[in-house]
Each structure stands twice: as structure tokens, then as C-alpha cells.
Amino acid sequence: MSTIAVVVNGDSMWPTLKHGDTFDAVPYSGQDVKIGEIIVFRDPTHESRICVKRVLHIKPDGLFVEGDNPDPTASTDSHNYGVVSFDLLIGMKR
């Protein structure tokens, strides 16, 4: 199975993923997404920007995601832009 190499930019997923870390993501092609998974998606507010967050809730209209960093100001996530629609999903961390 092919994978996508993802480079972390920023501290929103610290301490799980640090700025500069690289990981492989499995491309999303309609497979089930699970609560707790780390996903890669296009930012709902700036679709040219790619985000890495953890899935907290799965809703019929999309995914509620959040960064792992305990500092609430360290992550722009579903608390700011709401659920992430499935059509913005790029992949899931292996």
C-alpha cells in the first residue's frame, strides 16, 4: 500500500508529534476513521494549508478534531472551525 510522507510543522500535536517530525500516512479512500486516530486534512478555512490533528468525535457531517498540545492556544482545530468534512481528509497516520 502506498503512503504519504508528512512533515509536522508547528507544535499543535506536541508531545505526540514535534515540529520537524516525519510520519507516513495512508491515503484516505473512504475507509473507516476511528476516534483517537491522527489524520491529515486540508484546513477548512484555508484549503491550501494541510493540518494534522487527532479525531475526538465522529459525526454524520464530519470529524471533530483537536491537537494534542495541552496549551489551548497552541492549536487551531475544531474548537475554532467546527467539524472537518470527510471530503477534506487526505490520510491517516500509520
Image (spheres, helix red, strand yellow):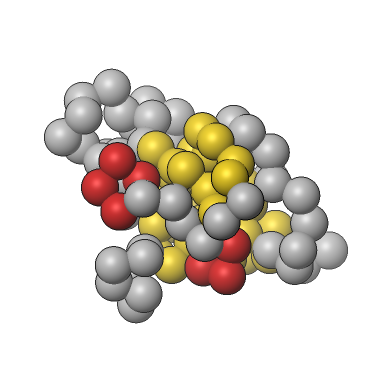
Work out whether 3 lies above or below 21: below
* Residue at the extreme bottom of the image, as rendered: 48
Q: Nearer the viewer, residue 21 or 40?
A: 40
User: Could you tell me residue 46's position as x and y percent?
Assistant: 29, 72
Name the side, left or right, on which 72 lies relative to 79: left
Count of marks placed on residues: 0
Asked if residue 8 shows in the view, the reply is no
Picture quadrant of residue 29: bottom right
Work out which quarter of the rendered image holds the C terminus and state it: top right
* Residue at the extreme right of the image, as rendered: 1
User: Could you tell me residue 16's position as x and y percent?
Assistant: 44, 29
Residue occupying image coordinates x 69% and y 38%: 34
Picture quadrant of residue 12: top left
Picture quadrant of residue 4: bottom right
Residue occupying image coordinates x 30% and y 53%: 81
* Residue at the extreme front of the image, as rendered: 60
Residue occupying image coordinates x 25% and y 47%: 80
Q: Which of 17 and 42 is in front in this view?
A: 42
Work out which quarter of the rendered image holds the N terminus and state it: bottom right
Work out whether 57 lies above or below 23: above
User: Could you tell me residue 39's position as x and y percent?
Assistant: 55, 50
Name the side, left or right, on which 56 lies relative to 12: right
Asked if residue 43 shows in the view, the reply is yes
* Residue at the extreme top of the image, as rendered: 70
User: Could you tell me residue 17's position as x and y percent?
Assistant: 42, 37
Name the side, left or right, on which 10 lies relative to 62: left
Residue occupying image coordinates x 49% and y 38%: 54
Name the side, left or right, on which 4 lies relative to 29: left
